[in-house]
Amino acid sequence: MRNWNTDDAPLYTELLRYASRRDVSFHVPGHKDGNFYTHKQGSMPYGFSEMLSIDVTEIEGTDDLHDPEGVIKEAQQKAAAFWDAEESFFLVGGSTVGNLALLLTVCSEPGSLLIVQRNVHKSIINGLMLAGAQAVFVSSDHEPSSQLPVTPHDVSLEQALKRYPQAKGVFITRPNYYGMGRDIRQTSELCHQYGVPLLVDEAHGAHYGLHPHFPTSAIQAGADGVVQSTHKMLTAMTMGAMLHVRGDRIDRDLLKTRLAMVQSSSPSYPIMASLDMARSVAEQQGEDTWKEALEAAAYIRNEIRKLNRFEILGPTDEKSYTEQDPFKIVIYDVEHNLNGYELQRKLQHQGCVAEMSDEHRTVLALGPGTTMSDAIRLMKTLKQIQDESDPDLLKSGLRRDQQNKVSAAAETFSTDEALLISEPVSFHLHQAQDVQSVKIEQAIGEICAEMIVPYPPGIPLVYAGEIVSRAAVTHLLKLRSAGARFQGSSDPSLQTIRVRKTK
């Protein structure tokens, strides 16, 4: 591994200069470079010594995130060059503030209409509410065996663009939490043919485009605005993220105004410095940044293939799912003796803490800090779990036959044309007061007052504010009959749903 030249990280270097001067602080923050703890308490809390010494504010030399002219401006310019963007912005509130800022920029007037992938992060829904915007939801394609949603097909997106020419843009997610996705270069071209920007929540893809083993990044694929959680799959501190912009389809001046609205006026300098460092190290180390982690990922995949009990989710021949992040390894028990939650608990009991799980799968998130010894420890644990012999072990997940029924019913979600593209759904901050519960069969034509999320496939079928269609009710009844679970509904059995009262 090459040595890292810290001078390449201008913001971080300036903070080091600040700490070395040991000036007397008559400015915020109140801990005064950590002096409160060392002088008044006698010792610094564990892990805070170096951190508090560079936890500064906007003073001479440290620049201003909301009006950068010095080291922050230089750090952001270096980030833009590294990620092939025209302009990049540091985010200290995670990808959430990037998504909010993009929405408030593109949907600049109340009632603006945006075409949105149905299974999006809640920050996008919150952004629609803050903007008072309308959304036309386009259903995602699904990976056939798992029924996990990936990205809407371009055919569906084009139908939505044709049907709603007033749309201000298209907002999609790539990759999903499981590392699944597809190439979106044609999606970018499609949006530009219709004169609208493509916005991408790429929170889990900050490393995309930085190594031949990774998929192309959304900004490299032609997207106009891309949000990345640099803290998730790279080496920045938690809450450190970036927003990358290209082209002239997004009003940059308005975007900067919106960012100032949703970001703190007192941003964390350690978080910003970690963004600067994450870029600098990855740029200087090049492919060496990923070498051991990629070897560890390959080792895990190869070793799991040797186990009889576990399998890994991977791309199929379906066009909806052609990319898999090598750093996201999705494991499931082929015998269905352990659901995803139980497998995660067993791994954690042995000191291997997974990223997340669902009713069937456990997701492992690797990164540049993953070592081969980590991979060896994981495989030792999985082999121990496989070797466990308990004849009384109950099948706590869905039984195989029931799972097949649910999957078969869920599969129609992606093929039912009436469900692919929603009618416009209005979002606002006003909470509906006059609501009532009705039998699901009686909800056709009513305005839904809650979000209905069948699992699988685990994506909203009806949003609050959306008119309940006959096709949606028919589909929900199929899923209910097949034994699917429902999230978001006040009645988990889905005998009834809540709708707005009509006067």
Image: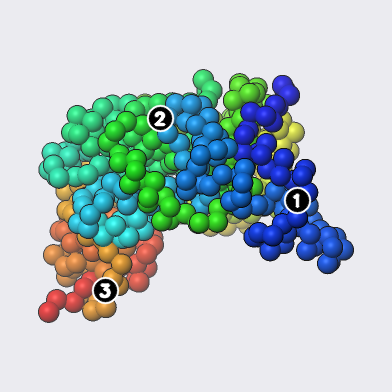
Rate crowding at label 3 as few (under 14), some (14 to 19) or many (20 or more) other CA atoms within 10 Å: some
Q: Image point 30% across, 72% down: which residue?
A: 431
Q: Image point 42% across, 47% down: which residue?
A: 98
What's the distance in space between the residues labelled 2 and 3, CA to CA? 42 Å
Q: Mark 1 points at which residue?
A: 23
User: In the displayed structure, would residue 13 be above or below residue 124?
Assistant: above
Residue nearest the viewer, comparing 270 with 185: 270
Q: In which quarter of the image is the N terminus?
A: top right
Residue nearest the viewer, comparing 200 with 460: 200
User: In the displayed structure, would residue 89 be above or below residue 126?
Assistant: above
Q: Mark 3 points at which residue?
A: 432
Amino acid at dot 1: Asp
Q: In this view, does 174 lie to the left or right of 438?
A: right
Amino acid at dot 3: Ala
Rate crowding at label 2 as few (under 14), some (14 to 19) or many (20 or more) other CA atoms within 10 Å: some
Amino acid at dot 2: Glu
